[in-house]
Image (cartoon, helix red, strand yellow):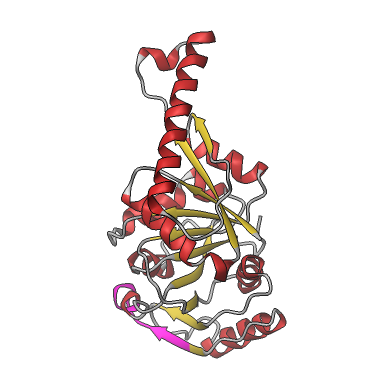
Amino acid sequence: MNKALIPVEMTLASNIALRYACQKSEILGIGLQPIHIEEPDHKAHSSETGWIRKSWESGLKQAGMDQVRQILLNEDLDCFIMPNPIVEVGDREDILLQELRLGDYDLFVEGEISNFNTGEFRKKLRSKLYRKMPCPALVVKNIIKSNRMAIVVDSRTDLESVVDQLCGVLQQRKIDFDLCVYSLDDFSHELQPEDIIGKAKALLAKRGQVPKRAFTLLTAPEKAALEFHEYGMIVSAVDRNSTRKSPLVEVLARVSCPLLLCWTYTSGRSK
């Protein structure tokens, strides 16, 4: 069973992520490890040291643990959830990164209310957490029951890395998925879509995965996003080394369905 780290908070985004992750837990083969982080405020007690600080942190942790257990009880989730939630006090990104590294997780799951704000989405991808996390991220924008997935790539996607990361999550489980090659405009100066599709199919076939449909999408990001509204999940890649705007990232920002984000590098190697 894969281990997935999932923040649990008293928010709608967190509730959506919990429900969706449980709904897809069999397909993804995941068990959920809840984590809750209380971030210190700027009041005097949060800067104290010694027993005062320890007592304050202990109280925060206990309140956080009570909150997590109540949330999980209220949700009545039908999937495997690790029996001991993790509750910490400190910087959210630092603690999540440390736990992801030390806990050897296969997936990070987080909710995000879909608002189609491309600037906010790019800001998330540039955050320390998303730039440095060592495993793929499942960003849940909506609860969609469909089990259909779409792997969406472009001419710059490191196909080997995406297939490796996706199959690392799926292991031997077969999925119902389509394969899409996206471009904002024509491919006249790039790899041809049939070459990209052929290479991706070959890589997937080696792992026992065969797309039901393979197609090319040539349009503006806002129109492309509408083509994926019936899918239960989009699988794609984000290049951590790239500093320029990517039309594919614009599509990912605009879709309303959950995203399984794999991490690639311009040099063609994953880290």
Residue found 45% across the figure and 57% down from its top:
77
Q: Where is residue 242 in the image (x, y as percent from the top left)?
A: 51, 58
Residue found 37% across the figure and 12% down from its top:
44
Q: Where is residue 212 in the image (x, y as percent from the top left)?
A: 53, 89
**Magenta run includes residue 251:** no
Instruction: Between residue 235 and residue 57, name the one nearer to us.
Output: 57
Magenta range: 215-224
Picture quarter with the N terminus? bottom right
Residue 264 seen: no
Picture quarter with the C terminus? bottom right
Q: Is residue 237 left or right of residue 228?
A: right
**Magenta run includes residue 218:** yes
| Up-down relation of residue 229 to residue 82 (above or below) | below
Quadrant of residue 170 in the image?
A: bottom right
Instruction: Between residue 157 and residue 67, name the one nearer to us.
Output: 67
Residue found 41% across the figure and 51% down from its top:
124
Q: Position of residue 41 (x, y in %)?
A: 37, 24
